[in-house]
Structures are given as structure tokens and as C-alpha cells.
Amino acid sequence: METSHIYPSAHTLNAYITIKGCIDALEFYKNAFGATEHGKLMMPDGSIGHAEILIEGSLLMLAEENEEWGNLSPKTIGGNPVSLILYVKDVDVVFQKAVDTGATILMAIENTFYGDRVGQVLDPFGYKWSIATHKEDMSFEEMQKRLDKM
């Protein structure tokens, strides 16, 4: 059997995030987003060197912050330019669950000009999550027309 060029459970492009408090983050993602743990590798000091979770069938890789490796978390660097988007069947339910689990609301849920119902939260570890349910298929031209009317 030939080995695929893509890691099992992965897509061609995947997010790998660095967390300060990775063990707690695993629990948060399980409780907030229904993540299932795919596997993890523990370091001698008890921290997570590498972990994999599946959320809605998509692989997310994460590891504990490690300054020696140059892996710094949003908490350490004081912000994060990356935003993750999670498509779910019911944005209202998942968004509220994330907030109830400890996420901070950055943008209340709204119906957007581009056809998604979406809200944004900041998780306790410094990552922005746009949680969305796709409601309407549209071309870029249709989206642009709606944007121009705003």
C-alpha cells in the first residue's frame, strides 16, 4: 500500500497553533467546539509537545509554547493576527457554548452580506474564532453588489 503525501486525517492545508496552557486548551476545545482528541505527545516536563484534535472533521494541531523552539503563544506576544473560522450546523448553539465555556465575544452573531451567519469570539488562549453557518450560496459578484450597497 502506497503512503499518501498527506498526513492521515489532514487536509492539504492545516492550522498548527501554539498555546500557553495547552492541556487546558484541549479541554476548552472539547467542551466549546466538540473536539475529539486524535492523539498527543507529552514532553518530559509534562507539557504537550504535539497534539491533534478533530473539530467537525477538520484537523487542528497544537503544541505548548516553547521559547527554545521559537514557538510563542498569542498570550506571550500580546496578540495574534490569525483568525480561525469554524463552520458548524448551528452557529447560535456553538457560539453560546464557546462563550459559556470561557470565550469572550468579539462580534455578536449576525447575518452577513456574503451569505453566512457568523459571530466571533476570543478563546482563553488568545485565538480569534469566527463561528459560522453558511446560509446562502453566492458568487463574488453578488457579494460585491451587497457590499457596495452597505
Image (tube, grey):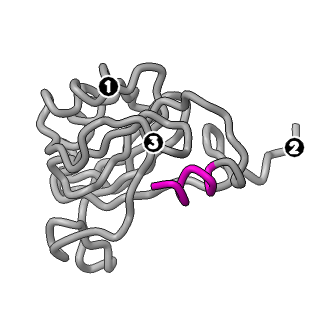
Q: Amino acid at mark 2?
A: Glu
| Relative vertical location of residue 46 with respect to residue 18 in this rendering, above or below | above
Per the model, the C-alpha gap separating discs 3 and 2 is 44 Å
* Labels 3, 2: front one: 3
Please give the label number shown on residue 94. Answer: 1
Residue situated in front as seen by the camera: 83 or 57 = 83
Q: Earlier in the sequence, mark 1 or mark 3?
A: 1
SS under mark 3: loop
| Relative vertical location of residue 139 with respect to residue 72 in this rendering, above or below | above
C-beta proximity under 8 Å, tags 3 and 2: no
Would residue 26 be found to the left or right of residue 59 on screen?
left
Q: Earlier in the sequence, mark 3 or mark 2?
A: 2
Residue 66 picture location, percent across and down? 25, 70
Per the model, the C-alpha gap separating discs 2 and 1 is 39 Å
Residue found 34% across the figure and 70% down from its top: 81
C-beta proximity under 8 Å, tags 2 and 1: no
Q: Which residues are magenta?
A: 143-150
Residue found 15% across the figure and 48% down from its top: 124
Residue situated in front as seen by the camera: 34 or 46 = 34
Per the model, the C-alpha gap separating discs 1 and 3 is 18 Å
Q: Check the image and name the residue furthest to the right.
A: 1
Would residue 138 be found to the left or right of residue 33 on screen?
right
Residue 103 image-quadrant placement: top left
